[in-house]
Image (cartoon, rainbow, N blue to C red):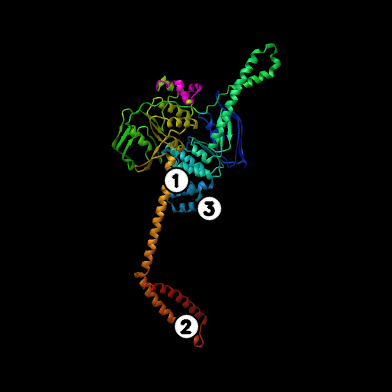
Amino acid sequence: MANLLQVENLTKSFGVNSLFDEINFTINEGEKVGLIAKNGTGKSTLLTILAGDDTPDDGTIIYRNDVSIGYLKQLPEFEPSLSVIDTCLVGDDRQSQAIRAYENALLGGDNEVITAAIQEMDSAGAWDYEERFKQILSQLKIYDFKQRISELSGGQIKRVALAKILISNPQFLILDEPTNHLDIDMIEWLETYLSRSRMTILMVTHDRYFLDKICSKILELDQKSIFAYDGNYNYYLEKRAERIDAQNAAVEKARNLLRTKIEWMRRQPQARAHKAQFRIDAFYDLKERAQRPNEKGEVVLNVKSGYIGKKIFTAHHVSKKFGDKVILNDFNYIFSRYEKLGIVGDNGVGKSTFIKLLLDRIQPDSGNFEIGETVQFGYYSQEGVTFDESKKVIDAIRDVAEHIYFDEKNHYSASQFLQLFLFSPADQQKLIAKLSGGEKRRLYLAMVLMRKPNFLILDEPTNDLDIDTLEILEDYLSKFSGCLIVVSHDRFFMDRCVDHTFVFQGDGVIKDFPGNYSEYRAWKEAHEKEEAQIQKQKNDAKEKTQRVNNRDNSKKLTFKEKKEFEELSKQIELLSAEKAELDALFNSGEQIDDVATKAARYEEVKDLLDEIELRWLELSEKE
């Protein structure tokens, strides 16, 4: 494979904080690569540098000549006054110009302008291009192509940005969290689209199923260095564990050897030190290696929930709608103790509204939720929390509590508690304004759990969290001795954390499925296959019945066929008489004027008679 991108000795720092130091890697044409790292270690910064939106402190980036690059930012921005279609077709290429002119001509209604636009669409070969971009927008559930960007939500803008990049079909595609704000159907469509694409891809995503299905190579940014793994996500997990074990063993060996070297250094007379300078240099190199931190296989989040009674909540005939849009329709449910529920469904069907109804943040049109007295909700919302960004991380936690007590054995200082969420003592002194989006979400999660809830409600908790944090949270939730509701498009996360699923199907319809998302998906596919087979059998039976009825009906002439039969009989009589006259003429031996014309008419009459008599015979069988 041809080399598409080569990165050599790339270095980037912000002040005294070094993100990566002299990293090297290559990406070959056609490779689909996942970039994995903890939040705040430089994933997005590296992508912006590769896309040309930022500059490194040092190093070189070498692309193959004339390679086209598409870059999906985490938070894309567009001109608010533009429509969706104009945003997607911003460009000077002939196809984009032709489509813009055609769409505007349709709005204007001038027939001459429309005709000219159609001719230009034909000439530019833009019809297939237009069909393609409208199909991509529709797959991402953007249907109003004339809607202004200013009227869209942040999630819709992200989907428009994704559609715009896919439409442009670049040779090298850089994606920063492409699955954020996509529902599960969209994610599965995008998986298939990218898997089949010939584009070279570099992506950052926390969606492990997405990574595993698409990527054939993983780059890990860790300890300011890059580690490459030629395989999918599962292969990466296996080989990363081997690397960490080997690294930890090497660090421990270096530390043991360092103890011996320290004794040697202490015994060195100052006067003879210059004679063993090479050993002294080796000592400092060894000291640096021995001071590298040991990597832990996993972090255990040992946060206990409060006691919860047997009564959790009961929904009594709850209904809610906004205008004509029905969210809940006479919904009844008894939530059990220790129940772990996942909620899935398309964007906009009412998943978040359901949670806000339960939390009494909005009121139902009718009915009510009856909540148990011991229930203590912990709510992690999509919107997150507004921090005072001038404060340090540690101060945000201390404002809530200096010490966090869960039981007699489990209590933490604010600093110890933050370390459970991967905030080192140095990280705790950072200003919140300096945190990455993922780090802020992790801090928000810590603030939710420190209040010791016994009923957790997590609305899209996986957005902007790195994989390490997700694994910690999943492990915690699997052992959580309380109740749980999770709204998420992350299938891996849902599979690990929930034991049954609400599927919001729209128009107030909720299906309660006794299993996780993958089990529901398998059931749905099998059910749809069975339904299709039953429908096929019904169609076959209907077709067979129709054929029988047609045969029965074919034995009788319709009124129209009777009229046709009578007309054909008259034509046969007339044509037969004309043919007989011509036969007699040709057999008379007399001189015939214009013999060629009469011969041609004779052949024409014969052919007509053959055709009409065949149809007459068909109809006569029904008499």
Tell me the crowding category of disc 1: few under 14, some 14 to 19, or many 20 or more residues within 10 angstroms, Cα based: some
Picture coordinates of residue 121, whole percent (x, y): 50, 51
**Quadrant showing the C terminus:** bottom left
Q: Quarter of the image holding residue 475?
A: top left
Secondary structure beneath label 1: helix
**Was residue 418 drawn as part of the magenta stretch in this picture?**
yes
Secondary structure beneath label 3: helix
Compared across the picture, whether 70 is left or right of 302 comes to right
Given the image, on which type of amino acid does mark 1 rest?
Answer: Ser
Pick whichever of labels 2 and 1 is earlier in the sequence: 1
Pick whichever of labels 3 and 2 is earlier in the sequence: 3
Given the image, on which type of amino acid does mark 3 rest?
Answer: Ser
Q: Is residue 31 above or below residue 38?
A: below
Q: Which residue is mark 1?
A: 138
Of residues 577 and 251, which is closer to you in this image? 251
What whole-number distance in Å separates the C-alpha atoms at marks 1 and 3?
Answer: 26 Å
In magenta, the rendered stretch is 407-432
Q: Which residue is mark 3?
A: 123
Q: Is mark 2 in CB contact (under 8 Å) with mark 1?
A: no
